[in-house]
Image (tube, rainbow, N blue to C red):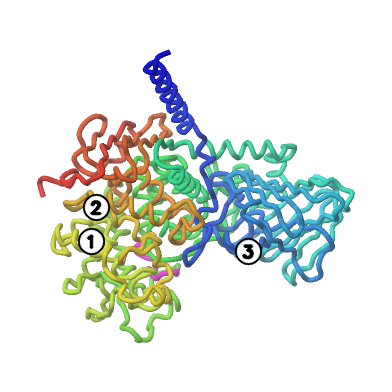
Amino acid sequence: MNKCARYSIIMVVIILLAVVMAGCVSSRDAVSYVNPNIGGVGHILQPTRPTVQLPNQMIRMYPDRKDYLDDQIRSFPLTLDSHRQGLLFSMMPFTGQPGQNRAPISAWNPGNEIATPYYYSVWLEDYDVTLEFTPGAKTGCFRMTFPHNAPKHVLLRTMQSGEWTRLDAQTVTGVEQFHGMKAFVYGQFSQPFEFTAAEQNRNRKGGLVSWTQDKPAVIEFKYAISFISDQQAKANFQSEIAGRSFETLKADARRAWSKVLNQIEVQGGTESQRRTFYTALYRCYERMMDITEDGRYYSNYDKKIHTADRPFYVDDWVWDSYLAHHPLRVILNPDQQADMIQSYVWMYQQSGWLPTFPLLWGDNPCMNGFHSTIMILDAYRKGIRNFDTATAFAAMKKNAMEATMLPWKNGPACALDRFYAEKGYYPALAPGQPETEPTVHSFEKRQSVAVTLGHSYDDWALSQYAAELGHADDAAYFAARANNYKNLYWKEKGFFMPKDDQGNWIDIDPKFDGGMGGREYYDENNGWTYLWQVQHDIPGLMDLMGGKKAFEQRLDQLFREDLGRSKYELWARFPDFTGIVGQFSMGNEPSFHIPYLYNFTDSPWKTQKKIRMLLNAWFPDTMFGIPGDEDGGGMSAFVVFSCMGFYPVTPGLPTYAIGSPVFEKVTIHLPNGKQFTVSAPGCSETNMYIQQAFLNGKPLTEPWITHDDIVNGGELKLIMGPRPNKTWGVKTNG
């Protein structure tokens, strides 16, 4: 065989191998990329947890430790009452003799931990016990492998107030009281046990479950949770987990995750980028959670048991999630989004107010604004109608007209709200001036600028929704209130600034003033972040700043402006201000849309540049891979959208800004059976700039696509290059 023939054969083999390997990459189950420990060490505030659950279901388990660097595990909760907050019930296996007045705790090693969305395993060093867990919807299964010839124990505890009791030789039950409601557990061990009541304190009674050293080394604990009754907990157990093996449950859990994660297929990018992307997508299914049990659910909003022919969802922090988390679900699962909105409507009917942070046990009115209004408008505008649209409007309007706008408060309006309705801004106090309104939260303060800006957006959404439903007078009234943001723009200063109740400006340093988190005027962020909180009226914001060019220059300045002090000093007052680039904070939700605002200028290429830089800098696939509080999908949805190459700058408008996709090809398998593809051949760390764009084969000259473009199926093709095409996406009509 001559050299040319041999060379040709070698090249054919190489090409075939490349094709096969490419096929393997594209067909790899997305679940295998997920690393729940990404972000497991918080930059300053809360870390992520390696949560094991089914998508949007009730049982959520993770090891009780401070963060990924904490080398001790205290227990394993049976579920949570809210994302990263209260734990409900717990178990902890151990060996040897039970200690007096000391709960077992064990060291662990990351090398001996397996964390996935559907399965968890860890070796407990102090007791030589391997613990495994896999979840069901309302159930869970622990499998413990103890050392041979050792006394074996499991300590069962309540985390708040309640008790465990033995029902028979292999069965335990428990009840836990929290925030005015109860949780019930029914559980069975695979081996008969001895039971000793364990006094935790006056309101918490646990149980010590024990086996002698001659008992089998492998013992399982299956359980079910109910928020309705102990009988319902047993029914959940019988219908979902009784008689099923650990391996069967594990396989079913993996299939559940495979179904939702593989709804988006990616090709290209690096292994690291795929891990970041699919881990972010997994995080988006932690909340909200379905608490419906056999067609019934208990609602602590009216403390009643209800029947329902559709799921009832709780646990949402809409200040965080309206920006990207809910809009992502609108694309991927609009029927589920409709169920979640209907759950909001039911909560309004049960409690009298449209909730802001609807937790399992009731509305937790954190942060500021009524952004559920925006979330509902966004879904409606994008074709979701399967909820009580009329009652939703009544709920929105009641909140806007009758509820207090005070941060971290719920209930009727106060004097400050009446001032807002008359004057069009929330009045502020001068530095050091004592509070005059007794209902103001002592730590959260008035947040006068943030409240004015947030409610301007809310009122815009209410106006738009009113118009959609044909309420012309309401639409006009709230459209006028949507302009209230303009009342706090101090042109000479170039910022949104506070005014007192006499209409006088309060001259502060917008970078740093306002007390802890800037809460006297802003909230968790400074005036630079809140300068851009007018998503509903970007042209109006441009006019305030002096036009498109000035708007772009201010954006440039945002990313370049010095802190004016050390990070030490900054973070002592603004601990949420993380992921810093100039005065931009990637680590807090109000910043998400800001890098996409260059698409409104004559330099859309700067959006492409900033998005790639921010993803690379702040979202690596490591324990430090989340720059701020992840908030159960709130931040991860930004990553999912941005990696795909587009983002909803203004929830409530059915449009998306184009950024710079991370992958050469992204395919969204839509629930209507169609596919939407973002194709960016040659896309890489170097080729991040869009040269040309085509939508379904036709040239696309503006950096936007619509919701219909996505859900109708088709292809957005982006020709990428190493240098920006500074003319692409620029409006020629000014």
Q: Which mark is residue 178?
A: 3
Instruction: Please indicate, yes or no, whether residue 307 appears anywhere in the rendered image.
Output: no
Describe the element under mark 2 as helix, strand or loop: helix
Amino acid type of the residue that numbered disc 1 sits on in the rendered structure: Asp
Circles 2 and 1, Cβ within 8 Å, touching? The answer is yes
Closer to viewer: mark 3 or mark 1: 1
Viewer-side residue, 297 vs 490: 490
Residue corresponding to mark 1: 556
Marks 3 and 1 sit apart, C-alpha to C-alpha, by: 48 Å
Q: On the picture, is 358 further left or further right than 293?
A: left
The percent coordinates of residue 203 (x first, y second) are 72, 69
Is 30 placed above or below 392 here?
above
**Neighbour tally class for label 2: few under 14, some 14-19, many 20 plus, Cα within 10 Å:** many
Describe the element under mark 3 as helix, strand or loop: strand
Instruction: Please indicate, yes or no, whether residue 207 appears anywhere in the rendered image.
Output: yes
Q: Main secondary structure of the magenta part?
A: loop
Identity of the residue drawn at 33% across and 68% down: 450
Residue most extreme to the top: 1
Q: On the picture, is 550 further left or further right than 419?
A: left
Segment tinted magenta in the rendering: 400-409
The percent coordinates of residue 434 (x first, y second) are 37, 86
Marks 3 and 2 sit apart, C-alpha to C-alpha, by: 49 Å
The percent coordinates of residue 720 (x first, y second) are 27, 39
Amino acid type of the residue that numbered disc 2 sits on in the rendered structure: Lys
Circles 3 and 2, Cβ within 8 Å, touching? The answer is no
Marks 2 and 1 sit apart, C-alpha to C-alpha, by: 9 Å
Residue corresponding to mark 2: 606
